[in-house]
Image (cartoon, helix red, strand yellow):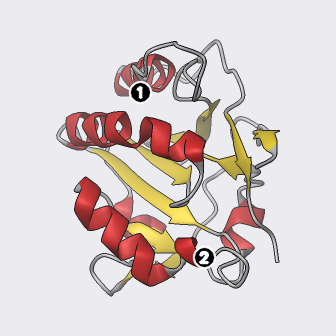
Amino acid sequence: MALTESNMLALGTVAPNFTLPDTISGSNKSYADIKGTKGTVVIFSCNHCPFVIHVNHELVKIANEYMAKDVGFVVISSNDIENYPLDGPEKMSLVAKVLKYPFPYLYDADQSIAKSYDAACTPDFYIFNKEDKLVYRGRMDGSRPGNDIPVTGADLRSALDAVMLGIDEISPQIPSAGCNIKWK
């Protein structure tokens, strides 16, 4: 595993559109399908990354909390499944069901969506306001496997609370860090 930080896509960027297969429902989902009326969270993730595994349970809590407040959530895996078969759609569906993902878990087979978001690592978090403009990109919190900081989701929650209030200037914005996306 190579520790990689977010590329920090430019604030104000309009959310790149996508239509990808959802490994949970079996149907295709677009940005418009998952968009929330108050804001939208797009997360690049995967099954095998220890940084993702470390935060998954808190991510599910945060999503359940904010989806009830009209914030849309989606998780996208863009990893090369030929070399990382644990990240394939069948395994994605299983992980999503076991962890009770309340959001779609989409598969980006050609990696074009990860490239359009300038995604670099897993997990990589992007929050868009109700006008679909990027207002936050960065970490969920300061916890990492082995650093003894509790997983709270503090940074992500703070950014989401700001979005709920219509605040677009969110600070701090500290890059997320995790495994690099496994490019083909």
Amino acid type assigned to the residue bearing label 1 in the image: Leu
Q: Secondary structure at mark 2?
A: loop
The residue located at (71%, 48%) in the rendering is 179
Q: Is residue 13 visible?
A: no
Position above or below: 144 against 77:
above
Whether the residues at callouts 1 and 2 have beta carbons within 8 Å, the answer is no
Q: Which mark is residue 73?
A: none
Nearer to us in this view, 98 or 174: 98
The residue located at (34%, 50%) in the rendering is 72
Q: Is residue 18 left or right of residue 24?
A: right
Q: Which residue is mark 1?
A: 160
The residue located at (72%, 29%) in the rendering is 175
Q: Which residue is mark 2?
A: 108
**Percent x, y of residue 177:** 70, 34
Q: Quadrant of residue 96?
A: bottom left
**Percent x, y of residue 86:** 54, 72
